[in-house]
Amino acid sequence: MRVAAEPVARTPGDRAGALVAGLLLAAGGGRRLGGRPKALLPFRGRPLVENGIRVLRDGGCATVTVVLGAAADEVRAAADLRAARVVVNADWATGMGSSLRVGLAALPDDASAVVVMLVDMPGVGAAAVARLIAAHRQDGAELAAAAYDGRRGHPVLFAARWWYEASTSARGDAGARAFLTAHQDALRLVECGDIAEDHDIDTPEDLGRLGG
């Protein structure tokens, strides 16, 4: 399904039901990697996008939506995406902001929150996702981000009431950065430095982090 990058208003879910969705942003074309789409980078013998889906599922997300973009047809052919709903951002080249808008618009209406994860962070596992979900379900956090030695990182959890505003503020390649900065007083940092690594895969020098 190809989706336009337009924000859609949502009503907040009930935390008692606590259906938390997962959103994997996997549309990037890997410009600094010589045009290698990040979703197709090899990780443990499989395309990297499969790892992101598994992490969100194992971390407690009831559903997973994947936003593809660059080489979407090749990704569909090479990767096992059966555990996720797939949407394609036709405007992926404009940056992460458009992928966030497409992804948020495609989420289930009954979700109380979403955990947004980037495909190129193989050091983030299910335990970090589970901590964010616990902060939402048990502590009532409506905005939460994994932190590494107190520094904000990824993944990030948004309660449903924030989806529209996060969508409308997402521009270029900054994703939700402006939104999170504007709401830093409401943002809960959930320390994950003991269970995850927040490095991403941006340049050829980073490829070693994917392992053999």
Image: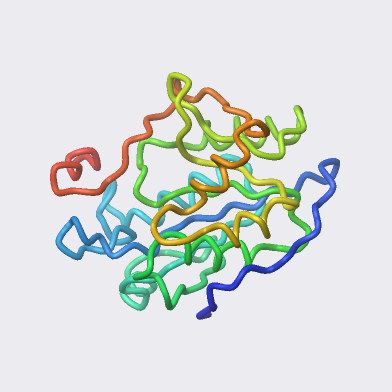
Please tell me which residue lies in front, 178 or 32.
178
Measuring 34% from the left and 53% from the top, which residue is drawn there?
A: 48
Q: Quadrant of residue 101?
A: bottom right
Where in the figure is residue 203, as x and y percent of width and height?
18, 48
Q: Quadrant of the C terminus?
A: top left
Is residue 18 shown left or right of residue 52?
right
Q: Is residue 81 above or below residue 185?
A: below
Where in the figure is residue 27, as x and y percent of width and height?
39, 64
Measuring 52% from the left and 60% from the top, which residue is drawn there?
A: 100
Please tell me which residue lies in front, 59 or 104.
104
Measuring 80% from the left and 58% from the top, which residue is drawn there?
A: 11
Q: Is residue 206 above or below residue 87?
A: above
Where in the figure is residue 113, as x and y percent of width and height?
70, 48
Is residue 4 shown left or right of residue 165?
left
Where in the figure is residue 20, as x and y percent of width and height?
69, 48
Is residue 201 shown left or right of residue 168?
left
Measuring 45% from the left and 35% from the top, which residue is drawn there?
A: 153
Please tell me which residue lies in front, 39 or 57.
39
Q: Is residue 14 above or below residue 198?
A: below
Q: Quadrant of residue 209?
A: top left
